[in-house]
Image (cartoon, rainbow, N blue to C red):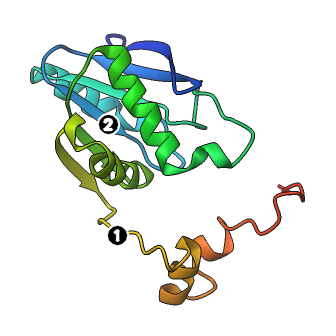
Amino acid sequence: MEKIQHSTIKTNGINMHIATIGTGPPVLLLHGFPELWYSWRHQLLSLSSLGYRAIAPDLRGFGDSDAPPSPVPYTTPYTVGDLVGLLDHLGIDQVFLVGHDWGAAIAWYFSLFRPDRVKAVINLSVPYFPRNPAVKFVEGFRAQFGDDYCFGSVFEISDLSVPLEA
């Protein structure tokens, strides 16, 4: 893994840590929650040995990438904007996009928002869920899986003015 190069780039108002290796067609690997670029370490090495340029960032708020304090810039348009900025910084027009878990959700929306930047999408563990503007995301999960489902009990914060307790 000593061949994997690490750098930090400025994109979309944040500093983003990236791990890269190889030359050839670019493959952008997007990690899940609560993971980092490190989740892709074996794939980075394998893809580079097959002639690909493998790139795995720490997404916004994870690892060595910046974590803005407000919840607002963690929405999908910001995260996709980070990745478009990453591609621009690296001089890449199109990528093979691979996502897992949270990264898969980002990959689906990246390919919807910017199909011109995506050569192909490979996603693991998260199917595409079209957005329903009439239903809030967490409420949709509650209706389908009940109040005890993790999205309903863990990820919803009703009052952001109250500090979270560990």
Q: Residue 29: which numbered mark, if any?
A: 2
The residue at 75%/39% (across/down) is 69
Reading the image, the residue beneath label 1 is 130
Question: Could you tell me which secondary element the residue under label 1 belongs to?
Answer: loop
Is 162 on the left or on the right of 99, as rendered?
Answer: right
Mark 1 nearby-residue class (10 Å; few <14, some 14–19, many ≥20): few
Using the image as rendered, state which of residue 45 and residue 71 is in the foreground: 71
Is 60 on the left or on the right of 2, as rendered?
Answer: right
Is 9 on the left or on the right of 26, as rendered?
Answer: right
Using the image as rendered, state which of residue 18 and residue 41 is in the foreground: 18
Q: Amino acid at mark 1?
A: Pro
Q: x, y percentage for residue 97? A: 25, 40
Mark 2 nearby-residue class (10 Å; few <14, some 14–19, many ≥20): many
Q: x, y percentage for residue 87? A: 33, 24
Specify the quadrant that holds the C terminus. Answer: bottom right
Residue 126 is drawn in which quadrant? Answer: bottom left
Q: x, y percentage for residue 19? A: 39, 21
